[in-house]
Amino acid sequence: MRRRLGGGVVLLVLLLLFFLPWWTLFASGTGWPFPVFLAGTVVFAAWLVSFPFLMAAGHGQRRADRAARVADTTLGVVWVLFTWSALGGLLHLVLIGLGVGGAGRARSIAVAVAVISAVLLAWGHHEAMRVPRVRQLDVHVPRLGGGLDGTRVVVLADTHYGPIDRAGWSARVAGAVNALDADIVIHAGDIADGTPTQRREQSAPLGTIRSRLAKVYVTGNHEYFGEAQGWLDRMAELGWEPLHNRHVLVERGGDALVLAGVDDVTAESSGLAGHRANLVDALAGAAPERPVLLVAHQPKYVGQAAAAGIDLQVSGHTHGGQIWPFNFLVRIDQPVVRGLSRHGERTQLYTSRGTGFWGPPFRVFAPSEITLLTLRPGDGPTA
């Protein structure tokens, strides 16, 4: 019964996503010639009917990359069209109330929705596929020793190597990271959609990334759709330190920082033996007076981090919303969508907007990032 109810909700959402753009563009009094109306209706009907099958083929057991590319692109296009169709509908109602526009009002709005959506999709695709810009900020950690002042921490997250072959992009990202001359490099999870074997070429450039003190990785929720343990093994093979509920100690100038990591919060429900978010294990043996930088894929883990007195948590997962206005929906599930925030008396959280993208190859008003955090001792300006 629950599965049927869930399937019914998904079907209603799909119908709404496809219906509103069709209605706005072709059937809301636009008065297009019949061949235009018919062509638009056929296209939307074909999209709607084929979409569930393409998603199942692309992201189900078959993992057919070609089907996934078509399905993911369709989802992004329809989401942007839906968003701007909804805004166009609101504008239509306002213009009706004001008595502006006359008989050509619906057609003008349809054209505006189509043009704005096309521009945003073209720009959003460029934003998704380019090498991310570097976002830099200082983070003041009161318990940090002076010897670690200026420690450069580069954060990658949500690379999502997937159906679109981005091996070249991956190599360029690795080059951008190496140019930052990092002391510590972090990958905060969601490394790929697929298995290590499927994404071997795309992940290979991660092995060229350099750091002075440590390169660490934690699992994200997407690893648990594939082979989480396989990805931990793959990252170790590439020279990274998998923080599978454990920590390493980094030292400089006579001072030390505990660099800890936990599995994603969804790990326990995956059924994979030995996988769950376990902060107690991650900190086992760490001296309590030392500052702690915790890597946890999802920002929502900050509640446990704050309760444990963690100094700084680094997370990803949200993509900054990826395609506006999805950030408002992300905010329902996560305490923070992006940037630096404070939680409790001691804990700060930095949430990356992510380095890659999931699914739809678009980023609209949510740019990707490679983050450079420079650690500073003492109190300072915080979010």
Image (cartoon, rainbow, N blue to C red):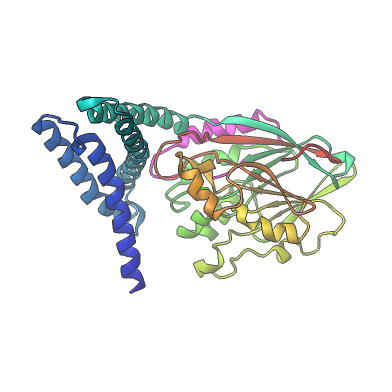
Q: Can residue 96 be seen in this view?
A: yes
In the rendered structure, does residue 244 fall within the stretch colored magenta? no
Q: Where is residue 136 in the image (x, y as percent from the top left)?
A: 68, 31
In the figure, is residue 339 to the left or right of 102? right
Q: Position of residue 74 (x, y in %)?
A: 31, 42
Residue name at image x 53 percent, y 35 percent: 368
271 to 150, vertically: above or below:
below
Q: Position of residue 115 (x, y in %)?
A: 31, 26
> Which residue appears farthest toward the bottom when viewing the image?
1
Residue name at image x 15 percent, y 31 percent: 31
Q: Position of residue 107 (x, y in %)?
A: 23, 28
Q: Can residue 190 be seen in this view?
A: no
Q: Looking at the rendering, in which quadrant would you find the C terminus?
A: top right
13 to 30, vertically: above or below:
below
Residue name at image x 10 percent, y 29 percent: 33
In the figure, is residue 295 to the left or right of 21? right
Of residues 305 and 213, the one drawn nearer to the viewer in this rendering = 305
242 to 185, vertically: above or below:
below
Of residues 141 and 255, the one drawn nearer to the viewer in this rendering = 141
Of residues 344 and 258, the one drawn nearer to the viewer in this rendering = 344
In the rendered structure, does residue 170 fall within the stretch colored magenta? yes
Magenta stretch, residue numbers:
156-182
